[in-house]
Amino acid sequence: MKRLLCVIASVWLLAGCPSLSPVTPPAPVETVTPPPVDTTPPPPPTDTVPVPPKMKKIEWEQSITPLVNQMVKSDGLTQGGTLLVNKIGNKTNSSLQTNVATGALMNSINKTGVLTVIPAGAVTSAMSVLGMDDNDTLTLRSKAIGLARYLNAQYVLYSVVTGTRDARQIEMQLMSVVSGEIIWSGKDAVLEQ
């Protein structure tokens, strides 16, 4: 019982002790004004846009015509023969408008009046009938010969542009459909403006 009285007395003593923490005054409040906003527009950028290099225009007619003139004078070529012109291939390190080049080649051959060029539309139709892709460049000679036989052509003309952007050459080969032999071949520089 003494113990119980001792515990009650100690609790009563401890409960009576003030345990207040020291009071600190509140911090003063200051008003802050924002810095003035700069409303002037930023100056225009001073960087200049680089000018792309000037593209050189390829003179397909002038590049092709001398080779065509050599070809139509070659031995073993029959006047009035039918010719399948293969799309000009690009084996350079740059892009070329090969459709434009092929069109210029066909025009140049037609101007000579020596050979009859099969129109591009007829070639496309025949390729479709034979199950070939429109973009097929007929790199396999057997495909070209098969297409030429289907179109009743006597000759196939292969052309490819080789070299680099600064020094391109066009190479041509005229092949007989019947024998498969190369009748004529020539090479010349591609002229640029």
Image (cartoon, grey):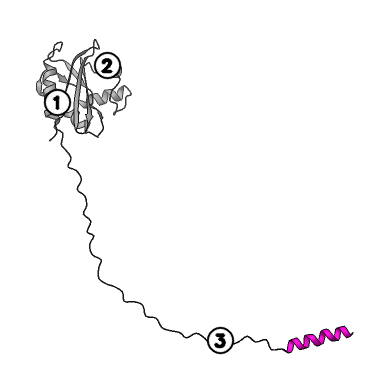
Q: Nearer the viewer, mark 3 or mark 1?
A: 3
Q: Amino acid at mark 1?
A: Ile
Tell me the residue that label 1 is attached to. 64
* Residue 169 position within the rendered picture, expressed as x and y whole percent measured from the top left: 19, 27
Q: Is residue 162 left or right of residue 78?
A: right
Q: Quadrant of the C terminus?
A: top left
Q: Element under label 1? A: helix
**Type of secondary structure dominating the magenta stretch:** helix
Tell me the residue that label 2 is attached to. 145
The stretch in magenta equals: 1-24
Q: Is residue 97 above or below residue 179?
A: below
Residue 118 appears in which quarter of the rendering? top left
Q: Amino acid at mark 2?
A: Ile
Q: Element under label 3? A: loop
Tell me the residue that label 3 is attached to. 24
Q: CA distance from mark 3 to mark 2?
A: 104 Å
Q: CA distance from mark 2 to mark 1?
A: 23 Å
